Amino acid sequence: MPVIDVQQDIENLTLTIVAEFAAPVERIWRIYADPRQLEKVWGPPTYPATVVDHELVPGGRTTYFMTGPDGERYAGYWQITAVDEPNGFSFDDGFADLDFNPAPGMPVSSNVYSFAEHDGATRVTYVSTFESAEDLKQVLEMGVVEGFSSALTQIDDLISV
Protein backbone atom coordinates (compact mmCIF):
# COMPACT_ATOMS: atom_id res chain seq x y z
CA MET A 1 0.00 0.00 0.00
CA PRO A 2 1.67 3.23 -1.11
CA VAL A 3 -0.25 5.50 1.30
CA ILE A 4 1.95 6.29 4.29
CA ASP A 5 -0.05 9.05 6.00
CA VAL A 6 -3.54 10.55 6.03
CA GLN A 7 -4.38 13.76 7.90
CA GLN A 8 -7.92 15.13 8.15
CA ASP A 9 -7.88 18.67 9.54
CA ILE A 10 -11.46 19.89 9.83
CA GLU A 11 -10.37 23.17 11.47
CA ASN A 12 -8.08 24.06 8.53
CA LEU A 13 -10.46 22.47 5.96
CA THR A 14 -7.75 20.16 4.59
CA LEU A 15 -7.28 16.54 3.73
CA THR A 16 -3.65 15.52 3.20
CA ILE A 17 -2.60 12.13 1.86
CA VAL A 18 1.06 11.17 1.49
CA ALA A 19 2.17 8.23 -0.64
CA GLU A 20 5.46 6.78 -1.82
CA PHE A 21 6.18 5.04 -5.10
CA ALA A 22 9.23 3.06 -6.21
CA ALA A 23 9.83 5.16 -9.31
CA PRO A 24 11.56 8.42 -10.24
CA VAL A 25 9.67 11.72 -9.99
CA GLU A 26 9.53 12.02 -13.79
CA ARG A 27 7.77 8.63 -14.05
CA ILE A 28 5.09 9.62 -11.55
CA TRP A 29 4.68 12.96 -13.33
CA ARG A 30 4.02 11.15 -16.64
CA ILE A 31 1.15 9.21 -15.07
CA TYR A 32 -0.66 12.46 -14.30
CA ALA A 33 0.36 14.18 -17.55
CA ASP A 34 -0.78 11.37 -19.89
CA PRO A 35 -4.58 10.93 -19.99
CA ARG A 36 -4.34 7.23 -20.92
CA GLN A 37 -2.15 6.53 -17.89
CA LEU A 38 -4.19 8.83 -15.64
CA GLU A 39 -7.37 6.92 -16.35
CA LYS A 40 -5.66 3.73 -15.12
CA VAL A 41 -5.15 5.25 -11.66
CA TRP A 42 -7.85 7.92 -11.22
CA GLY A 43 -10.72 6.36 -9.36
CA PRO A 44 -10.87 3.16 -7.34
CA PRO A 45 -10.53 -0.16 -9.20
CA THR A 46 -14.30 -0.76 -9.05
CA TYR A 47 -14.97 2.72 -10.51
CA PRO A 48 -12.57 2.98 -13.47
CA ALA A 49 -12.06 6.40 -15.01
CA THR A 50 -12.38 7.56 -18.57
CA VAL A 51 -10.55 10.82 -19.24
CA VAL A 52 -12.39 12.80 -21.92
CA ASP A 53 -10.24 15.95 -22.07
CA HIS A 54 -6.89 16.58 -20.39
CA GLU A 55 -5.00 19.83 -20.73
CA LEU A 56 -2.39 19.96 -17.96
CA VAL A 57 -1.45 23.63 -18.35
CA PRO A 58 -2.47 26.65 -16.25
CA GLY A 59 -6.03 27.50 -17.25
CA GLY A 60 -6.49 24.05 -18.81
CA ARG A 61 -9.30 21.68 -17.98
CA THR A 62 -9.55 17.96 -17.44
CA THR A 63 -12.90 16.20 -17.66
CA TYR A 64 -13.56 12.60 -16.75
CA PHE A 65 -16.15 10.17 -15.58
CA MET A 66 -15.94 7.09 -13.43
CA THR A 67 -18.14 4.10 -14.20
CA GLY A 68 -19.51 2.17 -11.25
CA PRO A 69 -20.09 -1.58 -11.12
CA ASP A 70 -23.75 -0.99 -12.02
CA GLY A 71 -22.79 0.99 -15.16
CA GLU A 72 -23.72 4.35 -13.61
CA ARG A 73 -21.39 7.20 -14.64
CA TYR A 74 -20.11 9.85 -12.22
CA ALA A 75 -18.50 12.88 -13.84
CA GLY A 76 -15.95 15.35 -12.57
CA TYR A 77 -13.54 18.03 -13.69
CA TRP A 78 -10.23 19.64 -12.85
CA GLN A 79 -9.57 23.31 -13.54
CA ILE A 80 -5.78 23.54 -13.68
CA THR A 81 -4.38 26.52 -11.74
CA ALA A 82 -0.59 25.91 -11.78
CA VAL A 83 1.93 23.48 -13.28
CA ASP A 84 5.53 22.91 -12.19
CA GLU A 85 6.67 19.98 -14.34
CA PRO A 86 7.74 17.45 -13.03
CA ASN A 87 7.40 18.61 -9.42
CA GLY A 88 3.63 18.92 -9.26
CA PHE A 89 0.53 20.82 -10.19
CA SER A 90 -2.51 22.53 -8.66
CA PHE A 91 -6.15 22.40 -9.65
CA ASP A 92 -9.70 22.86 -8.50
CA ASP A 93 -11.56 19.54 -8.46
CA GLY A 94 -15.32 19.32 -8.66
CA PHE A 95 -18.24 17.05 -9.30
CA ALA A 96 -20.10 17.52 -12.58
CA ASP A 97 -23.12 16.43 -14.55
CA LEU A 98 -22.56 14.19 -17.56
CA ASP A 99 -22.04 17.28 -19.76
CA PHE A 100 -19.21 18.30 -17.38
CA ASN A 101 -21.04 21.31 -15.95
CA PRO A 102 -20.25 21.83 -12.25
CA ALA A 103 -22.79 20.03 -10.05
CA PRO A 104 -24.64 22.57 -7.89
CA GLY A 105 -24.37 22.00 -4.16
CA MET A 106 -21.45 19.58 -4.45
CA PRO A 107 -18.06 20.34 -2.88
CA VAL A 108 -15.20 21.81 -4.88
CA SER A 109 -11.68 21.45 -3.51
CA SER A 110 -8.44 23.26 -4.28
CA ASN A 111 -5.68 20.69 -4.70
CA VAL A 112 -1.91 20.75 -4.68
CA TYR A 113 -0.08 17.60 -5.78
CA SER A 114 3.65 17.72 -5.02
CA PHE A 115 6.20 15.14 -6.23
CA ALA A 116 9.63 14.89 -4.58
CA GLU A 117 12.51 12.42 -4.58
CA HIS A 118 12.79 10.65 -1.21
CA ASP A 119 15.30 7.88 -0.49
CA GLY A 120 15.39 6.71 -4.11
CA ALA A 121 11.61 6.75 -4.48
CA THR A 122 9.01 9.44 -5.10
CA ARG A 123 7.00 10.86 -2.24
CA VAL A 124 3.76 12.46 -3.36
CA THR A 125 1.83 14.80 -1.12
CA TYR A 126 -1.80 15.33 -2.07
CA VAL A 127 -3.41 18.30 -0.28
CA SER A 128 -7.09 19.12 -0.79
CA THR A 129 -8.54 22.29 0.74
CA PHE A 130 -12.29 22.70 0.99
CA GLU A 131 -14.48 25.79 1.22
CA SER A 132 -16.15 24.65 4.44
CA ALA A 133 -15.95 22.01 7.16
CA GLU A 134 -19.28 20.69 5.87
CA ASP A 135 -17.81 20.15 2.40
CA LEU A 136 -14.83 18.27 3.81
CA LYS A 137 -17.06 16.16 6.04
CA GLN A 138 -19.31 15.38 3.06
CA VAL A 139 -16.48 13.92 0.96
CA LEU A 140 -15.12 12.05 3.96
CA GLU A 141 -18.55 10.46 4.44
CA MET A 142 -18.59 9.61 0.72
CA GLY A 143 -15.43 7.52 1.31
CA VAL A 144 -12.83 9.76 -0.36
CA VAL A 145 -9.96 8.46 1.79
CA GLU A 146 -10.72 4.81 1.06
CA GLY A 147 -11.43 5.44 -2.62
CA PHE A 148 -8.35 7.59 -3.18
CA SER A 149 -6.14 5.15 -1.27
CA SER A 150 -7.34 2.20 -3.36
CA ALA A 151 -6.87 4.27 -6.54
CA LEU A 152 -3.26 4.98 -5.56
CA THR A 153 -2.47 1.26 -5.27
CA GLN A 154 -3.00 1.11 -9.03
CA ILE A 155 0.08 3.32 -9.53
CA ASP A 156 2.27 0.52 -8.16
CA ASP A 157 0.82 -1.83 -10.79
CA LEU A 158 1.37 0.70 -13.57
CA ILE A 159 5.00 1.48 -12.71
CA SER A 160 5.89 -2.20 -12.35
CA VAL A 161 5.13 -2.87 -16.03
Image: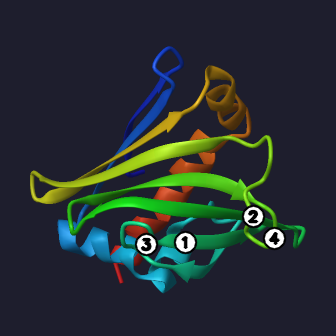
Residue that extends furthest to the left in the rendered view of this protein: 119
Q: Please state which amino acid type lies under the numbered disc 4.
A: Leu
Q: As rendered, which of 160 and 82 lies closer to the eye?
A: 82
Distance, label 3 to label 4, CA atoms, is 29 Å
Distance, label 2 to label 4, CA atoms, is 7 Å
Q: Is residue 124 left or right of residue 54?
A: left
Say which label, 2 or 3, has the lower sequence index.
Answer: 2
Distance, label 4 to label 1, CA atoms, is 14 Å
The residue that disc 4 covers is 98
The residue that disc 3 covers is 157
In the image, which is nearer the foreground, mark 2 or mark 1?
Answer: 2
The residue that disc 1 covers is 62
Say which label, 1 or 3, has the lower sequence index.
Answer: 1
Q: Position of residue 25 (x, y in %)?
A: 19, 66
Say which label, 2 or 1, has the lower sequence index.
Answer: 1
Q: Position of residue 118 (x, y in %)?
A: 13, 50
**Residue at (54%, 59%) from the top-left corner?**
151
In what element is the residue under mark 3? Answer: helix
Q: Please state which amino acid type lies under the numbered disc 1.
A: Thr
In the image, which is nearer the foreground, mark 1 or mark 3?
Answer: 1
In what element is the residue under mark 4? Answer: loop
